[in-house]
Image: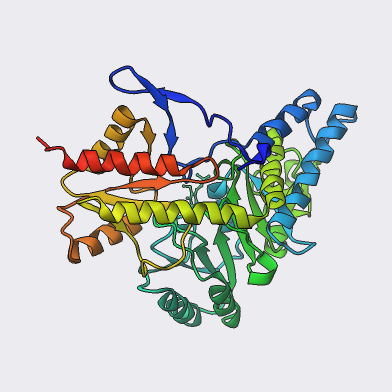
Amino acid sequence: FPDRELRVVGADVTVPLNDGRRVPYANFDYAASAPCLEAVHEAITRALPYYSSVHRGAGYASQVTTAAYEKARGTVRSFLGAWRRASVVFTRNTTDAMNLLAHALPAGTTVVVFETEHHATLLPWKNVVRLPAPASPLEAVAAADRALAQAPTGPRLLVVTAASNVTGELWPLRELAETAHRNGARIAVDAAQHVPHRPLDMTALGLDYVAFSGHKLYAPFGAGVLAGRSDWLRAADPYLKGGGASASVEDRGDTTRWQAEPEARHEAGTPNVLGVIALAAACEALAATGWDSLVEHEERLLTRLRSGLARVPGVRELTLWDERHPRVGIVSFTVEGWNARDVALTLSGEYGIGVRDGKFCAHPFVRHLLASAENGEGCQDGQSTAVRASFGIGSTEEHVDRLLAALTRLTSEPRG
Ligand code: PMP
């Protein structure tokens, strides 16, 4: 990307190989945490001299920091296409945001999720109906419809991922939102893997809640977002109890009055000010670039990677739906005769390529994909984990070619 702000920090780092040589790092682990953008780095550097606690200080630095922190909510609101009065609560990450939402659900809410979810979205709920992996996007909508229609009376919430962290596949959000609303339910979307790759418009799609993490959006760790409708958040007990959430505290502990606004009510304690400023800077940089060039870059690399992988003997991509279904820059695969850990360690130690191996905090989903692969034509010799290559703004065709060349060599080596 010619735009300097869109360069990633560390694009030119080299890493040591097992034999001691150093090579440029090829980072294929963006889905875990993406590298920081130059624009984000600069925003942090600008904020540091005024680094001060928010909300409570009267000093100039505190006022500047408070203004930047509160401005970040507006930035996130427009980044997500949220309506003007939507709440934007800063959390630690997506996991924290989903747990906050679970905490804020009215008593007796039935939650419907698919087993394809990341654990952050699969696990926090109390009354939960877990649906099996749907065979197609259409079936996903039909299954959600049935489950919501059959749910006991009372509040209902459909929780879905926008883009899978295992297969990169994009879920039919608009149709799922319509289905949820037709059944009197709300929809919460885990957009952790969506927002770094594609624009999201909560209002146009009809999404009630969206969660994401800064560290997957080219900002550092420790800040995330829960955006959406205010009423349940307003009515819930504070997620954390302490300073900031309390409006007034009397001498007797049972007479505390809590802040009404969700942002204050659920963000007790000193927040991650720099993390939030960084997250908002990432939103601004991505929105300012316009998505077309980002999507075009990613599609080009994705096609190159997927068609290349299809040509490497023994490599099999894991995908839930039709292979032409739209997806973001995340590809998981197995290598026949190799366990995923050895593939990942060999790519790192011998080629300077960083991928991830395992079940990607989506155990039921990865088990499902591996079992389907085993039942299909290509026997996967009892694999229990997979390799994931994920990429983004700092990735290049040269990185993709290196990965493909490394896998080609690796699969041609005899395994003792
Ligand atoms: N949802 C998805 C789809 C993810 O990929 C991840 C991170 N792997 C999470 C939720 C959890 O994000 P965090 O670890 O930042 O809470």
Q: Position of residue 18 (x, y in %)?
A: 29, 22
Q: Position of residue 144 (x, y in %)?
A: 47, 76
Which residue occupies the foreground of this view, 149 or 277? Answer: 277
Residue 240 image-quadrant placement: top right
Residue 71 image-quadrant placement: top right
The structure residue drawn at horizontal position 53% and vertical position 32%, both measured from the top left corner, is 11
Residue 257 vertical position relative to residue 352 in the rendered view, above or below: below
Q: Position of residue 387 (x, y in %)?
A: 32, 46
Which residue occupies the foreground of this view, 374 or 1? Answer: 1
Marker count (numbered): 0
The structure residue drawn at horizontal position 78% and vertical position 52%, both measured from the top left corner, is 74
Q: Quadrant of the N terminus?
A: top right
Q: Is 118 placed left or right of 295 in the picture?
A: left
Q: Quadrant of the C terminus?
A: top left
Residue 67 image-quadrant placement: top right
> Quick one: which residue is furthest to the left in this view?
416
The structure residue drawn at horizontal position 32% and vertical position 55%, both measured from the top left corner, is 366
| Residue 406 seen in the current view | yes
Residue 67 vertical position relative to residue 259 in the rendered view, above or below: above
Q: Position of residue 244 (x, y in %)?
A: 76, 41
Q: Is 216 placed left or right of 255 in the picture?
A: left
